[in-house]
Image: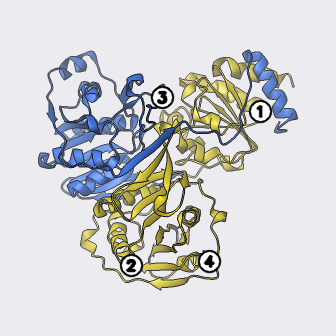
Chain colours: A blue, B yellow
Amino acid sequence: MKIAVCIKQVPTREWQPRVNEARTWIREQDASFELNEPDAYALEEALRLRERHGGEVVVCAAGPARVQPVIREALARGADRALHVQGDGLASADAAMVADALAAAMRDEGFDLVLTGLQSDDQGHGQTGVVLAERLGMAHSTIIMEVELQEGRGIRVKRELEGGWFQWVSLPLPAILTIQSGINQLRYATLKGIMAAKKKEIRVVPPPEGLEPTQEIVALTVPTKSKKTQLIAGSPADAAKELVRRLREEARVL
Amino acid sequence: MILVIAETRQGTVNRASWEAIAAAQALADGTPVRVVVLVAPGGSAAQELAAADVEQVVLVQHEMLAQYTPDAYVAVLQQVIEAAAPAFVVLPHTYQTRDFAPLLAARLRKPLITDVVAINGRGTAATFARPMFQGKLIAEVRPRGGAPAFISVQIGAFRADAARRGSGATVAPQAVTLEAGTIRQKPEAPFQEARQAVDLSQAERIVSVGRGIKAQEHVQLAERLAAALRAELAASRPICDSGWLPMDRQVGSSGQTVAPKLYVALGISGAIQHLVGMKGSRVIVAVNKDADAPIFEVADYGIVGDLFEVVPALVSELEKG
C-alpha cells in the first residue's frame, strides 16, 4: 500500500507569541519550529500500517525551505521518502492554499491512503485534509481513532464523535483520513534512523501557479482577557496560604 | 441572505445550532436569515427551528439522510446553496461540521473561516475573530473569493438564548436529488466505549491535571490535592491519551463538560478543546509555570509557578484546616 502523510512545521509549544510590525503574521525570526503534533500521530499510524501490510510511506509537506528539518525528522522516524512543495509564500498560507499546493504535487503519485493530523497547532483551520480529499477526488473521514484495512474492500475506521461517542465508518480506497492525537504511542528517531534519513530522497517541487488566499489576516493580536484573574504572588507557601484564604473567605468554595 | 446549517442529534436540534442562529442574526445587516435542516422523513426538527426569528426554515427530507455522511451532506447542501444564493453560510464548529464543511466550501471554491469566536461589523463589511497558535493569538480575518463565505462559530462563543425568537417562521420543504452511489462512506451506529464510570458533571469540586505534570508518577500529587479538597480528579486530553488517567476522567470537547463550584487546573495550558469543557465552572484556579498560558484568560485565581512546589504547599495549607 502506498501511503502519504501530510505534515506541517509549526512554532514550538514553548514559543512566546510575537507579531510582525504590520500585525498580519508572526515574527518568524523569533520562533523555533517543530513537527505539528497531530501530524506526528498520523505519521506513526502510517508507519504501523506499513509494518502490518507492507508498502511505502511518503512524507508530504508544503512550506518554505525552513520546513526541511521536520521532513528529515519524519524520514528518521521511518518514512521512506519525501515530497516538499517549496515556496516562501506557503509560510502563512491558509488551509485551502496548502491543500491546493499539496494536491498538485501528490496527484500523479497514485496514493492509496493519505493521512494527516486533524488540525495544525499554528493556524488551526482544521481543513487541509478534507480540502485535499476534494481536490484529489478521494473519499474521506475525520478525527480517526483506529484504522482497519479490509483486504480488497477498502478500510474501516473509528471516528470520534463528541462527548465520548464513536462510530465505525467503511470507506473505499483511495481515501484520506485526519488522525486524532493520541491514537497511538509515538516512536522517536533512533541514531540509525537519523543516519539513514540523510540518504533518503526529498523531492522538491515548486507550488502550482495561481494560488490565491481564501482569507486575509487583517490583524493578529494577543487576546484580551475576558476575566480579571487575580494573580497571587509570593513564595509557594505564601501563595498557597493566600489562595486558600481567598477560596474560603472571598469565593466561599471550600 | 444568510443561511444557517442546523445540526440535529437523534432528531432534535442541538444547542450549537441555536448558537449559530444567534451568530447569523448578529452578522445580518437587515438581510434575512434562513435555516436549513437535513433529516430523515418525519420528526419535528423543522418545527423546533421555526420558533427562531428567521425568514424561513428550509427542510430537506431524504431516506439517505437518516445517518450523517459527509458525501450526502455536501451533495444536498450544494443544491440548497445554489438555489438560495446566500451571502454567508453560518455553521456551529462541531465535529460534524469539521467533517463536511471544508469539502463543501472546497467544492464550491469559496472561503471557509472556522472556529470563529467574535464577529466585528455586519454583512459584507464584517471581519471574523478566530484563535490561532493554540489560542496564544487572535486573528481578525476577512474572507476572500466571493459569496458565500462559510463561517463556523466556536461552541459557546455565541449564546443560544440570545437567538431571537419570532412569531413562527414558514417551513419550506426542498426537494433534492441524491444518488446512493455517490455516498462513499458507510457509517455504522454510534456507540459509547464503556458506560462512563465517573460522572464529572455532578462533581462540586474538580482538580484537573495537564501536560505540566510531566510523568505518570506525579499524578499522585494531584490526587493528594483532590483528597484535601474533597474533589474529583480529572485531566486534559494528553494525560488520558498517555494512559496516566482513564479516558472517563477527561474534560473537554472530546470528554466531559463540567461546571463545578471549584475547578483547579494544574499544569494545563488551556487549549480551546479543554476550555470548552470547563469554562462554565463557577471559580477557576490555575497553577501554571507559563504566565501567558491561555488558561489564565478564564481563571479567577492564578499562581504563576512550579506546580511541584505549589501543590504540596496547598495540600499542607488545606490539611491545617
Q: CA distance from mark 1 to mark 2?
A: 52 Å
Do discs 4 and 3 belong to a common subunit? no
Query: Residue B51: which numbered mark, if any?
Result: 4
Measured as percent of width and height from the top left, residue B67 is found at: 41, 69
Is residue B93 something that shows in the picture? no
Give the alpha-carbon distance from disc 4 to disc 3, as whole Å: 46 Å
Cα–Cα span, label 4 and label 1: 45 Å
Query: Residue at the spot x=42%, y=32% of the render?
Result: A26
- Is residue B115 visible in the rendered image? The answer is yes
Question: How many C-alpha atoms fall within 10 Å of the one at disc 4: few (<14), some, or many (≥20)?
Answer: some
A203 sits to left or right of B15: left
Q: Nearer the viewer, residue A24 or A82?
A: A24
What is the secondary structure assignment of the residue under circle 1? helix
Tell me the distance, in whole angstroms, between the alpha carbons under discs 3 and 1. Answer: 38 Å
Identify the mark at residue B37; answer none if there is no mark. Answer: none
Please provide percent x and percent y for residue A60: 23, 38
Residue wearing tag 1: B229
Q: Is residue B160 above or below residue A225?
A: below
Nearer the viewer's eye, disc 4 or disc 3?
A: 3
Residue drawn at the location 69% of the way across and 40% of the way down: A227
Q: Chain of mark 1?
A: B
Q: Is residue B5 left or right of residue B250?
A: left
Q: Which residue is mark 3?
A: A18
Amino acid type indicated by mark 2:
Glu
Residue contact at pointers 4 and 1, CB within 8 angstroms: no
| Mark 3 or 1: the one toward you | 3
Query: Label 2 neighbourhood size at 10 Å, few (<14), some (14-19), many (20+)?
Result: few
Q: Position of residue B24 (x, y in %)?
A: 53, 65
Give yes or no for contact between labels 1 and 2 (Cβ–Cβ under 8 Å).
no
For marks 1 and 2, the one nearer the N-term is 2
